[in-house]
Image (cartoon, coloured by chain):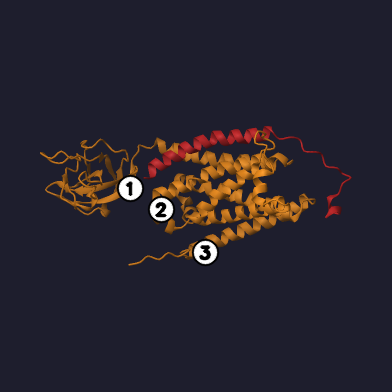
């Protein structure tokens, strides 16, 4: 019972490796530069 | 007769395991919030808590996913496996707290039901940068809930092992959803590269370990350990689960043979029978099979699958690939028998 499950695990992880790295790469490439911090604005004052 | 189940069968090892786990989670959350409040003084306590719970759950999920292949590569990691369910339930609790706080923080202050708001406030499904990543986390949490709720022997026995295992293999779907949840969510607004590097490393370690363990096992000759010779009474069998089928490993006349455990007559348990007149005899209706061919002696025509066997030391190994019913297999000789 163990061997077929382990073969299934290997196949799943081969597919996951492709999909997850693709999602990760797509997510990283889609990142935009966040607006730079405004040094004149101190959020602490608004708490 | 009745069978009762305890929520947790506590013993010393489990108490130590859970104490270490509880302390590690508390230290992590304390350190994350403490350091976070120093590095990002503009972040609110709620934000730090949400981030701390989320990263703690994700880190724990990586540890959980790494334990399986580590144990297959090196038996010294086995103690981590014994109470892996406790890690899973803890991870779910952390993820649930992260989800609940996020729902309150980002969706509970309007006039729309928070769950409705979760699915309707962002519908940019065509955009990677603005993808509604929170819904991905919600579905991952649903899977983790299902798994945490069934992480008990009660469910293992009642659902049966194959169904329970398939259910718990949904963790891979949850993992994929969570990687997408973080990549399309927190990673989009995070200016520091720490999260991206850590997530990339975590994925590489988990994926690498699984592929490594799987590849190492494929290189083996296919035989799996079935039992010790001493565990098989003379002229009887020990039944083992092998290759998705129950296999009856018989010891007789100084040799060992393995055949399918299922009688062709009415699916009787051949492994519970014994060898009479040189034939495996089904305990239900007396149907007989030769142990080295799986075929009934003439004039009968029933045949069951056979399996290759070998003996190393005191250990019996069986090749889980069933041979066509009636295929002759040379029995494995018991040394010094």
Measure the alpha-carbon separation of dots 3 and 1. 32 Å
Nearest the camera: B222 or B243? B243
Q: Is residue B41 above or below residue B308?
A: below
List x then y, in percent, for residue A18.
55, 33
Q: Give the chain letter at badge 3.
A: B
* Residue identified by numbered label 3: B15
Residue name at image x 52 percent, y 43 percent: B172
* Residue identified by numbered label 1: B241
Q: Is residue B289 left or right of residue B307?
A: left
* Residue identified by numbered label 2: B159
First-in-chain label (3 vs 1): 3
Q: In the figure, the red chain has which letter?
A: A
Residue at the front extreme, as displayed:
B111
Badge nearest the viewer, 1 or 2: 2
Q: Is residue B333 left or right of residue B196?
A: left
Q: Give the chain letter at badge 2.
A: B
List x then y, in percent, for residue B302.
18, 40
First-in-chain label (3 vs 2): 3
- Say which quadrant the N terminus of chain B sits in: bottom left
Residue name at image x 48 percent, y 38 percent: A12
- Of helix, strand and loop, which one carries label 1? strand
Q: In the figure, the orange chain has which letter?
A: B
Residue name at image x 56 percent, y 34 percent: A19
Measure the alpha-carbon separation of dots 1 and 2. 18 Å
């Amino acid at each position: 019972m163990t061997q077929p499950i382990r073969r299934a695990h290997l196949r799943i992880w081969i597919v996951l490796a492709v999909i997850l790295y693709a999602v990760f790469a797509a997510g990283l490439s889609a990142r935009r530069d966040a607006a730079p911090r405004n040094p004149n604005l101190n959020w602490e004052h608004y708490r | 007769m009745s069978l009762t189940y305890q929520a947790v069968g506590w013993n010393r090892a489990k108490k130590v395991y859970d104490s270490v786990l509880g302390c590690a989670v508390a230290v992590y959350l304390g350190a994350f919030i403490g350091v976070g409040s120093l590095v990002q003084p503009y972040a609110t306590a709620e934000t730090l808590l949400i981030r701390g719970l989320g990263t703690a759950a994700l880190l724990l999920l990586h540890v959980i996913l790494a334990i399986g292949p580590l144990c297959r590569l090196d038996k010294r990691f086995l103690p981590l496996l014994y109470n892996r369910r406790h890690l899973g339930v803890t991870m779910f609790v952390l993820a649930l707290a992260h989800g609940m706080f996020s729902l309150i923080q980002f969706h509970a202050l309007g006039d729309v039901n928070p769950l409705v708001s979760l699915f309707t406030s962002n519908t940019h499904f065509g955009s990677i940068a603005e993808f509604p990543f929170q819904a991905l986390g919600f579905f991952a949490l649903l899977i983790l809930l299902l798994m945490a709720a069934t992480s008990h022997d009660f469910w293992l026995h009642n659902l049966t092992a194959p169904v329970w295992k398939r259910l718990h293999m949904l963790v891979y779907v949850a993992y994929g959803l969570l990687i997408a949840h973080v990549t399309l969510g927190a990673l989009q607004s995070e200016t520091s590269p720490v999260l991206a590097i850590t997530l990339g490393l975590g994925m590489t370690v988990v994926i690498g370990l699984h592929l490594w363990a799987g590849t190492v096992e494929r290189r083996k000759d296919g035989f799996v350990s079935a039992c010790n010779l001493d565990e098989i009474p003379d002229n009887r069998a020990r039944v083992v689960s092998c290759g998705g089928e129950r296999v009856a490993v018989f010891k007789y006349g100084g040799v060992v043979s393995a055949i399918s455990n299922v009688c062709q007559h009415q699916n009787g348990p051949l492994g519970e029978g014994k060898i009479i007149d040189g034939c495996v005899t089904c305990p239900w209706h007396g149907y007989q099979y030769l142990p080295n061919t799986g075929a009934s002696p003439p004039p009968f025509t029933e045949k069951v699958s056979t399996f290759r066997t070998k003996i190393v030391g005191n250990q019996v190994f069986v090749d889980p690939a069933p041979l066509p019913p009636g295929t002759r297999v040379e029995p494995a000789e018991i040394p010094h028998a």
